[in-house]
Structure formats: structure tokens, C-alpha cells
Image: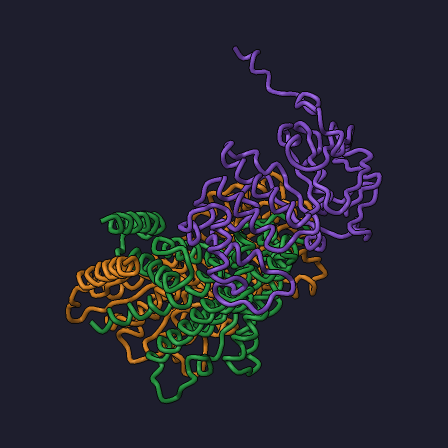
Chain colours: A purple, B green, C orange
Amino acid sequence: MLRLEDVAVSFGKTDVLKNINCTLEAGDFVVIVGGNGAGKSTLFDTIAGKIKPQAGKISINNQEVTNLDEIDRSSLVTRIFQKVDLNSIGSFSVAKNLAFARYSRKAARLVDGMNTITQEEVATIIGNLGLDAAVIDRPMKSLSGGQKQLIAFAMATQQIPHILLLDEPTAALDPQAATTLLKHAVKFIKEHKVTTILITHDPHIALHVGNKIWILEQGKIVKQFNQSEKNGLKPEDLIGQIDYKSLL
Amino acid sequence: MLEIVQILQGVLERGLIFSVVVAGVYLATQLINFDNLSIEGAFGLGGALTALLLFYGVNPWATLLCAILAGVLSGVVTGYLHKNLKLNPLISGIVMTTGLFSILLKIAGSNMMINQQITIFTTFKFIPNYVQKLLILILLMSLLFVCIRWFLTTEIGFLLHALGDNPQMLINVGKRVDRYTMLGIGLSNGLAALSGALFVQYTGYFSIWASVGILIIGLAGMILAQSISKSFGMGLLLGSIFYQVIITLTFELQLDQSWNKLITAVLIVLLIVLKGSLRKS
Amino acid sequence: MSYKSLLIIILAGVSMMIAITLLRNKTTKKNQYTIGILQTAAHPALDATVKGFIESLHEQLGDTVEYEIQNAQGSITQAHALAQKLHIQKKYDLFFAVATPAAQALKTQEHERPIIIAAVTDPKTVGLIEHNGNVCGVSDMIDVPGQIEFMLSLVPDAKTVGLLYTAGEPNSQVLVDLMQQELKAKNLTPVLCALQSETDAQAAMELACRKCDVILAPTDNTVASTIALLATIADQYQKPLIVSWLSDDIKEHKGVLAARGVNYFEGGKQAGTMAYQLLTQQTTAANLGITTIDSQNTYIKP
């Protein structure tokens, strides 16, 4: 459960987030829709602890976390970045990355290969993602964007997250890869009732996943739609679209 | 003929001593992705401390240990400057080396001779001196490289590797990036200090100017080693020896001495290109 | 596979080295002496020293002496490596080391054949002299009281004296300490202007010019290398600059008011005479010891 009260963030003289008030109950899956510069990434940075708000309170599970830094908050907030390379260790193999993902503060002594995961488990995970077993020993950086994000998602969910932040996860993916990723994510989130926030500028995603939609515009949450209110919404209601006609 | 063997021995010995700096540069640059300009300061620190401690009769092997610890401390402070005080990484290194210069002057003055009768190279009374130097260096380096290689497979080793690749991953598992950076640079400088200590015991004196140019020796050795493999190993040792061969070759050619630096540069390029074409065939 | 190719390359380099060394080993004729000269760096004072050395020996022994000059180009590591090489080769009868790094590098490795040193201000402090050692030579220590007198004779109203030197240079430190003592004894105020390297010579000099009535420079490698710049600044600020050594280029710099001290060329010649004595007479380095170069030479800008 996540609550933001009167949260405001500014960089120098510019106000990036103004008066954010919102609550996420356990099991909610919110899609935040907003254009570039609306403040989406800043919002995530604030929730995750990379940025300390100039004003306001942030609580997770009724515990105030405003003064916790990113490292201390990392056990509560799991984030998948838009920039694919931030979600894994490029020079490590896929198997090693998955092992690393299971590593937590309470990890047992690790030896070469980081025995937090077995080969069978790795194979199962890769299989479930629909990926070729050949990728297991390849360095992460040699994979395609779609493969990387899929594995990143698997990594982020090796331990069930308290709060899951998905930062435009499909922005750099082609439709097929995007579909695979979203399918997989939605299934996992539903199955484990993970409290999730997904940021996108694609309104179609907002209409088809999750149970709530928030519209972020110029640093403010201007509209909130819950499950029942979502029905009947059209993409244009959420955000502007590419005007293809004007290109001709 | 014997003379040539002795010259080669000298090249080998220097190559071994400087391979520790190469390893230090590797830890900083390749492992944790930090361009460590404090390496020269650490080299000097190790040397000065060794000279001073030997003067006070401390066991020569113990002085190596002290040198390493001092080096590690200098690395930790450099890391602190960068991560906690938010200084640019290059500036942090420069600040450390500059500050250390004054500290070194205070520790050992600008110049200090040591008693060559009591160094790590005189540990075994029954082995003649000219053999003992090489022998001890080989033993020491083998041990060191095996230790470092093992270390890199431990949990901390992995975390340092991850740190250099993507610090965000450390945050994700709740590990403090600043602490691991300080550790990484600390290890890097510890090695440089060890090299400096060895150099003083090997040459018989400490000079504050000896550390000038050490960074280049470390970088050149590492780059030459990279042409074999990107990972840590014997390659670094060979890279260091290789560089010493090039330098010695330059002097052997005995052309107008002013051209030496250019010749060194040309030789490095030649040999790397040769290496590249050999690899392709 | 890749280790193998690097090893091949190293072997190639080593073979080249061996080939070149062998080719360069000419057989020495009878009655010929070979002297190994290790020069720390290339700069006017040291160059002059070596020149003087060779000339003096040439006068006395003609063509029977062969010289091999190695230049460490300012690197301690290089000095050591070159000294090692010199020490290894049996063909050298004696060695000539110019400036402290070269002297120390040779001294720590060569314990039998004589080593003549030059351009070292205080050989004892840097550990070169031992009882019955094999080191002798010329020291460029100057007569400090005389130097101060000389300075006062040119600039009698001086109150503050800037001492320009390199921090970390043992030879300069020795001189600066003596100068400080002497200046204080004469109720003058010494101002220490230490520089780290050639790059901050300008800053140090400008500071000295602003704060002091006269600038005195001891025999210091970095100061000697940057003398042209220092002289220009002295001229700019119209402050008297007095140096403690003589070399041909001193006279060319407008800003240098006067010089009093050692003439490195002469010093080299003195060292050359020592070499002659060691080679032809039954004497040892321990006997010859360290002598100072005549430091009364003066030059005053006309």
C-alpha cells in the first residue's frame, strides 16, 4: 500500500511535481498516462527514493519512508527502468543475472556462480518466458531489447515485490516483444496480487491492463479513473495521439 | 652472454614489481569503472612508509603489510571524496595524489636510502642475492595473483564487478554504492602501495619522484594485457613484463636519446598491431 | 591460444634486444678505457657537466677512453634500470653519475668499481658516502655566507629575500635550509617559495616577486630548467634575480641580475681529473673523496 500526501518536487526554480495526493491499495494496478515532461519519471524517482521531495509525505504499508534513501527503500520498492541496460548487469550471463536477482540482504554465502539459484530453476524461468535456452549463458548485453526486458522482469520478480514500478517498459520494444512482456507481467501481477504502477504514454495499454488509470499532466494528477470508470474511455480521452493524417 | 641474461633478469624483475600496479589499475578501471588517478600517490605512500619503517628496524615483510594498509586507506578516502563529497572521479584522484605528496615529504623526506642488507630480498641467507630477488618476486606475484583471482569469485568480488557494470543493481539489492566504491579503490591503491614498497626494497632507496609515471606504466601494462583477455589473470603480469621489454628495447637501440619516448610509442603500436594480425590468422 | 601469441611477441622483443646488445658489443682495444656515464636528465647544467668531464679526460687521455652516455630522462625508474644495465656489463672501468637519481641508482647496485658523482649538493645526506666506499666526486655545494654577502653587495637595501626551489628536491632543501639560517643571522627575512614542478614555476615566481625585494635561487634542477621564464618574470616585476650557478645560457636571460656559484662545466672537468687519477694512478675512490667545485665564480649583468 502506497500513499503520497502533498508531495512536491522541484529542480531549482522549476516545479516538476505539484501537490501529488494519491493512494494505492494493496493489489491495485495503476497505469499512469502522461506525455513527455509530465513528470512521470520524477514521480517514480520520488517513490523509489532517488529524489527527496521538497514537501509532502510518502508512506508504504503505513510506514513513513520519506526520509529513507533509495538503498534503504529498495526492499520495499522494486523498479524496472525504461532504460533497459539499467535493469541488469550487461557483462554477466543471463544465468548469473538471475542468480544475482535472488541475492538479498539475507543471502547465504555465495561462491562462484552465486549459488542462490540452480541450473534447473534458471532453465524453467527462461522456458516460462518463452525464450530459447541458448540465451542462458550469453552475456546480457548481447540480447535484444525485448529479451532483456523480459529477463529483467523475471529478475525483478524473483522475490515478490511489495510495490512494483514499471517505467515505460515497452517503450523501446516492437509490438510483438511488447505483447509478450505485457502478457507475462499481467499474469504475474494478477497471480501474486502485486501492487503495481505502470507508466506509459500509450493510452491503449492503460485501457487494457490494470484496474486504475491516473492522468499526469504538468506535474499534477489531473484525473483518476477506477475500474468501472475505465469502461467506455477512448484513447483520445487519456492523451493526444500521433496525428498520422497530417503527415500525408 | 651472462650479461644478457642479467639484463633480462632485470626486465623480468621490474615487470613483476610493476605488474602489481597493473593489477591495481585493472581493479579500478576494469572492475569498478573508476579512473583512479590516485594510484601514483599510493605508490609513493607505500614506498615512503616502507623506507621509514625499515629505518626503524621493522621487519621487511611487515613493512609490506603496513604499506598495503596505508594504500587501502588512501583509496577509501579517495572513494569518499568521490561518492560522499561528490567530487568528480578524476578530481578525487588528483586531489589525493597532490595531498599525498606533502604527506610523503613529511614521512620520508624527499629521499631516503635504506639498508640493503635487510630487505625481503635477504630473507633467505643461503640463497645468493642475485637469484633471491627474482625468486622472491616470482613467489610473491604468484601468490598475489592467485589470491586476487580467488577474491574476484567471492561475493564481494561479484558485487564489485556489478558495481562497475551497473551501480543501480547494487542499489536494487540494498548494497551501499559508496561503500563498495571505497572498497574497490582501496584495493586498487593497496596494490599500488605494495608495488611502491617492493620498488623501494628492490632499488635500495626511496625517492619522492619515483612515482611519477607509474600511472602510465600501469595503464600501458593493462592495455597490453587486454590484447589477450579482458579478465584478470596472468595476462596482466605478461602485459607489465611486455611493457618493460619495450622500454628496455628502446634504450638498447641507443639512438639519439631524445627520441626515446617516440620510439616507445611506435614500438607499442607496432607490437599491438602485430598481435592483432597474429590473432586473426 | 592468446597467451601463446603474447609469449611469442615477448620472445620476439627479447630476441631483438639480445641481437642488438650483441651487435653493439664491440671488442675493446688494449689500453682502452670504457666509462659509463649516467645522466639523470637533459638540461643545461647537467649537459655542461658531462661535457666538461669528457673534455678534461680527452685532454689527459686522448682517444684511449670510450664513453657511453645514458640519459634517464628524469625518471627514477629509468635511472635504476639503466644503472642496472651499466652495472651488469663488465666492460666499464668506472662510472660517472650526474645528479642524485643517477648517483643513487648506481650506488645501490655497484659496490666495486668506482663511481664519480657530480651535480649533487650534499652527497652525505643522500646516503652516497660511506666509509671505504667506492663513491667520490664533486659536490656543487656553494659557499652560502659568501653568497649572501654577494647578494647584499648588489642589493644592500633588501629586507625580504625570496628563496625559489623545488619542494621534494633533497639538494635544494639542504641549500635552502642553510640560506635561511644565514639570512636570519643577518636580520633578513627569508620567504620560502616552493614549487612542485615546472608547471607552477610561474606562479611561485610571481608570488616571490610580489612579496620580496630580491629573489635568490639555489642550485635546483627545476629552477635551472625554467630559468628563461623566471628571468622574464623578474624583468617584468623589475626585481633582482640572483642564481647560484653559472652556465652559458645565464648571460642570455635579461632578467638575471647576477650569478655566483659553481660553473658546471668546470665541475665536470674536475670530475674528469678524478677519473684520470682513478684510471692511471693507484688510488681509490675512498681516497679521493668529495671535493667542492670552486663556487666563487661570479657574473654580474652589465
Q: Residue at x 54, y 75 (%)?
A: B65
**Relative side of A236 to C19, left or right:** right
Does the rendering let one see residue B37?
no
**Relative side of B197 to C11, left or right:** right
**Relative side of B266 to A87, left or right:** left
Farthest-out residue, bottom: B126
Picture quadrant where residue A239 is located: top right
Q: Is residue C82 above or below residue B267?
A: below
Q: Residue at x 49, y 74 (%)?
A: B113
Picture quadrant where residue C210 is located: top right
Which x, y percent locates residue C176? 60, 62
Does the rendering let one see residue A25?
yes
A137 vs B130, nearest the viewer:
A137
Which x, y percent locates residue A159? 62, 55
C189 vs B183, nearest the viewer:
B183
Which x, y percent locates residue B40? 52, 59
**Figure label count:** 0
A209 vs A44, nearest the viewer:
A209
Which x, y percent locates residue B49? 56, 72
